[in-house]
């Protein structure tokens, strides 16, 4: 059975919306993020257009460094309402091409078009049509990748940005991936890059011929997934999601209201373990952790902490929860329920929460 999966990712999203609304900016470097304050600004770059990227400016870079590299750039604060509206319009169009639709961040989504296309010519026509529709009705450009797996479709959408279309047929996977840096593989970030580099693995070509049992031997569970990805055998489906996730939370009600410290702490451990499994499984990072405490009589408190960087770290999460719990640890009232929420989510370092302010204010 042929599978045609598309990954669609808007180009320089926030910056493209600003340029659309101010055509004078068209050929200038445009940087969205914190106020650069003549080079003394704190905070980071949210994104920038392709003109600005020529100066070496990138998302998440300190705004002061961006300013050093390109003081003549146009620096704008983000307007999230506008981006959310554009995102909703784009997602509606993408969704109209297939009911198998999964939005994974503010500017990217997968669709499975296997049922509406039989040949690669038809696939290409559909992709061009989708680009055109988005351009005509929202006024911004999108890059689209097609492959038989989600992971390769994602790598493909990034291949010819901006406004690119890339189709990777199954027999072309090896040639397509081989020269790429291993960090192109979803799930291999800067940290794991070092680990792989130490083993002499730099490009995907260094990985692609390693047999499955050796991959598992060397890299454990993730070795298995990476082997599947690079061999085009990643079978993950496009999940029909109504809306992409903004937070994940878990709560537990005690069998009997309690103020036993050990019992409460072990409940925190249990919840964090569950959340940690989830973030690992879905490759999600979080910046904000919220503790919820409900005392007898349904009196409820929530306390949050936001970290400067997205993380998946379990120990960090436990320490923060203990820190937030301090305030209540001497409380005489008994606790009925505890809950933990993680929010400000991102996939690899990409923002998937609608409220992106924290990125700009860091
Ligand atoms: P991306 O799709 O990663 O970036 P982009 O659309 O700006 O550029 P590209 O053409 O390479 O796809 O992220 C989408 C939006 O999310 C981006 O426009 C701004 C926001 N964002 C941040 O605010 N901070 C970040 O660190 C990143 C990566 C993205
Ligand atoms: Mg994008």
Image (cartoon, helix red, strand yellow):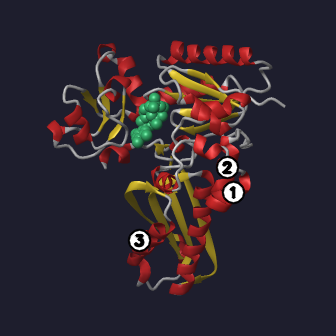
* Camera-nearest label, 2 or 3: 2
Considering only vertical position in the picture, is 92 above or below 128?
below
> How crowded is the residue under tag 2: few (<14 C-alpha within 10 Å), some, or many (20+)?
few
Helix or strand or loop: what does disc 2 sit on?
Answer: loop
Q: Residue at x 47, y 19 (%)?
A: 140
Pointer 3: what residue? Answer: 324
Q: Where is residue 114 in the image (x, y as percent from the top left)?
A: 77, 27
Mark linked to residue 214: 1
Of 267 and 337, the residue lying toward us: 267
Pointer 2: what residue? Answer: 210
Placement of the N terminus among the 4 image quadrants: top right
Q: Can residue 83 be seen in this view?
A: no
C-alpha span from label 1 to label 2:
6 Å
Q: Residue at x 54, y 49 (%)?
A: 201
> How crowded is the residue under tag 3: few (<14 C-alpha within 10 Å), some, or many (20+)?
some
Seen as rendered, the residue at the extreme front is: 200
Of 134 and 3, the residue lying toward us: 3
């Amino acid at each position: 059975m042929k599978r045609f999966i598309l990954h669609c990712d808007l180009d320089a999203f926030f910056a493209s919306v600003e340029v659309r609304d101010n055509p004078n900016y068209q050929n200038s470097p445009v940087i969205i993020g914190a106020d650069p304050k003549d080079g003394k600004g704190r905070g980071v770059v949210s994104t920038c257009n392709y003109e600005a990227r020529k100066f070496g400016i990138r998302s998440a870079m300190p705004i002061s460094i961006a300013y050093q590299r390109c003081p003549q750039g146009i620096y704008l604060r983000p307007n999230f309402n506008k981006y959310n509206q554009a995102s909703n319009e784009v997602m509606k169009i993408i969704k109209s091409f297939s009911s198998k639709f999964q939005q994974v961040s503010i500017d990217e989504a997968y669709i499975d078009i296997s049922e509406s296309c039989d040949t690669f010519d038809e696939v290409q026509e559909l992709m061009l049509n989708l680009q055109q529709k988005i351009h005509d009705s929202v006024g911004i450009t999108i890059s689209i990748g097609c492959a038989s797996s989600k992971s390769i479709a994602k790598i493909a959408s990034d291949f010819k940005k901006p406004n690119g279309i890339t189709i990777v047929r199954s027999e072309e996977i090896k040639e397509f991936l081989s020269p790429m840096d291993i960090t192109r593989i979803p799930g291999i970030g800067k940290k794991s890059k070092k680990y792989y580099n130490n083993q002499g693995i730099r490009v995907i070509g260094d990985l692609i011929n390693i047999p499955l049992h050796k991959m598992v031997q060397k890299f454990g569970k993730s070795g298995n997934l990476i082997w599947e990805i690079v061999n085009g055998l990643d079978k993950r489906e496009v999940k029909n999601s109504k809306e992409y996730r903004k937070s994940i939370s878990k709560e537990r009600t005690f069998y009997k209201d309690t103020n036993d410290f050990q019992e409460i702490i072990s409940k925190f451990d249990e919840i964090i373990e569950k959340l940690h499994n989830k973030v690992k499984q879905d490759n999600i990072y979080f910046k904000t952790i919220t503790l919820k405490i409900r005392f007898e009589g349904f009196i409820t408190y929530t306390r949050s902490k936001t970290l400067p960087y997205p993380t998946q770290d379990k120990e960090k999460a436990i320490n923060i929860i203990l820190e937030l719990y301090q305030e209540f640890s001497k409380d005489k009232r008994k606790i009925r329920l505890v809950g933990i929420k993680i929010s400000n989510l991102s996939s690899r370092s990409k923002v998937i929460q609608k409220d992106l302010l924290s990125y700009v204010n860091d």
